[in-house]
Image: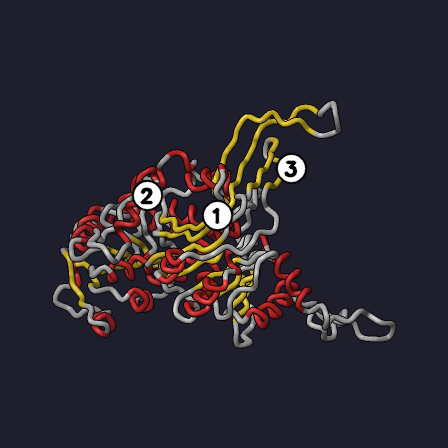
Amino acid sequence: MRIVVVGDVMLDVDLSGDATRLSPDAPVPVVDVSGMKRRAGGAGLVARMLAQDGWPVTLVTVLGDDDAGRQLESHLTGMRLVSGPSGCSSPVKTRVRAGSHPVVRFDQGCGKAPVPDASPAMLRAVEKAGVIIVADYGRGLAANPQLRELLARLAGTIPIIWDPHPAGPDPVPGVAVVTPNLAEAGKAAQALAGERRQAPVPGGPRRDLHGSEAHSPEHQPEDPAVQAGRILLEHWQSRAVLVTKGEHGAVLLREGGSSPEAVPAPRVEGGDPCGAGDRLAASLAVHLLAGRDLGEAARLAVHDAADFLASGGVSALPDPDSGRDAGAASDAEAAFDASTAAPLRPPIPVGGKRRISEPLLLARVVRDNGGKVVATGGCFDLLHAGHVRSLAAARELGDCLIVCLNSDDSVRRLKGPERPIIGQQDRAELLLAMECVDAVLIFDEDTPEAALERLRPDVWVKGGDYEGARLPEAGLVEKWGGRCLTVPYHPARSTTGLADALAKVS
């Protein structure tokens, strides 16, 4: 289940230092450069984000035959790169920062470029995708006719996320979602509605972006993102448009005339917004590949983008020269490539990066490799030796173990207002720290049935206190050919007993 990123790459250069004086030649700051970082930008940044997280990713792009092109190729290690010649110089974007403040950016070779050819190898790589991100940066690859024909054909069978560019072509019809930011969406919608807009005339009605009468003062005006999104949804003929609004989150519009869905964003203090759109597109691909609904995928992706900015954005990404990513990617290739007799348990990537732990995607990939998915559930409020023994025993029954974890609200309804003792995120983190646990799926219902319906495990495991009794979930699990098993129960060890013991010493 490979993620394929298609699009234009560029070399991003960051110069950083301090500015303590003005130039004697002009009233401009003098930056004493103390650091320089180079990295792949554009579609290359999207692919690197995915590779650094351990996902199996292929980058389909074109490269210039120059020094910048060779530098770009060196920064694209750790992923499968399928490239052709661009036929022009490689674009380079250089940002200068004084402390935490941007001073200037200058671009080289970033003008209009001819539409490059798409080689047979590039087209074959796109055909093998489980999900596609088109990261268009206006350099022509997204306008290639053979590539567009292929993408239009694939749009009916696999999710395609299209990140558009003002200088690029329209998305092909039928893609799963297009992700313009508010400025891009507004500019594109105004261009499309230009001939329909009417200037206000004395005594006549005012017209909005659609050419219809504007709202009267006593009515709340429509969100500009919704207004632009409706026009673009109709024109692009995509299945959805997700207009991002920075700190204000995003709005999702779907085909069929359903109401727009607001997607709020967590508050992030400051931060460099560079790369947030790339992070959002990458996260959308992961969540859609896992089988999530677009609405849920959009909410998670907006949160992922906010987390990315809160953790430092592109400046906090690992140095691509460290050599850590190649190892991580080779681990991901081994764990996810269904065409090889590879290990089914995704390894923990080298360099301290996370192991692959997205539960729905993990279940899908393990099954595609012919493996057995095991799931168990519970509150796991205070982890103790009994939990550890039961989880380790459950893991031995298959090729991955996914824990269905009751949310905080679910625990309160089941055990009372004083529980849980530990919040759901901390409980999930503790479970993932155990070698025997591969993924955690948090559910909000009182029972795990809905989570099981999404995971469809081959084996559902409960503690031995159910021994001799039919498990409540047995009928559901047997619907898809799964089975229910019990593992040894350790009655002397319990969360309640541990909580009582802690209360006596507190």
Q: First in sequence, mark 1 or 2: give its number.
A: 1
Q: Nearer the viewer, residue 415 or 63?
A: 63
Q: Which mark is residue 444?
A: none
Q: Is residue 163 left or right of residue 157?
A: right
Residue hosting label 2: 328
Residue at 66%, 68% in the rendered image: 192
Q: For this rendering, which residue is in front, 475 or 423?
A: 475
Name the N-terminal-most of marks 3 and 2: 3
Task: Compute the Cα span from label 1 to label 3.
Answer: 26 Å
Image spot of residue 40 (x, y percent): 47, 43
Residue 435 percent across, percent down from the top left? 24, 46
- Pick out the residue farthest to the left: 468
Question: In the depicted view, which residue is nearer to us: 456 or 347?
Answer: 347
Asked if residue 455 lies left or right of residue 110, the reply is left
State the residue in front, 10 or 283: 10
Q: Is residue 183 left or right of residue 491?
A: right
C-alpha distance separating marks 3 and 2: 35 Å
- Residue 367 seen in the figure: yes
Q: Secondary structure at mark 2?
A: helix
Mark 1 Cα shell of 10 Å, populated few (<14), some (14-19), many (≥20): some
Q: Amino acid at mark 3?
A: Val
Left or right: 108, with 453 as reference point: right
Q: Position of residue 460 (x, y in %)?
A: 21, 63
Dot 2: within a 10 Å radius of its alpha carbon, few (fewer than 14), some, or many (20 or more) residues? many
Q: Which residue is the site of mark 1? A: 307
Q: Is residue 245 above or below residue 221?
A: above
Q: Amino acid at mark 2?
A: Ala
> Looking at the image, do the residues carrying marks 1 and 2 touch, with CB atoms under 8 Å apart?
no
As drawn, the label of residue 104 is 3
Q: Secondary structure at mark 1?
A: helix
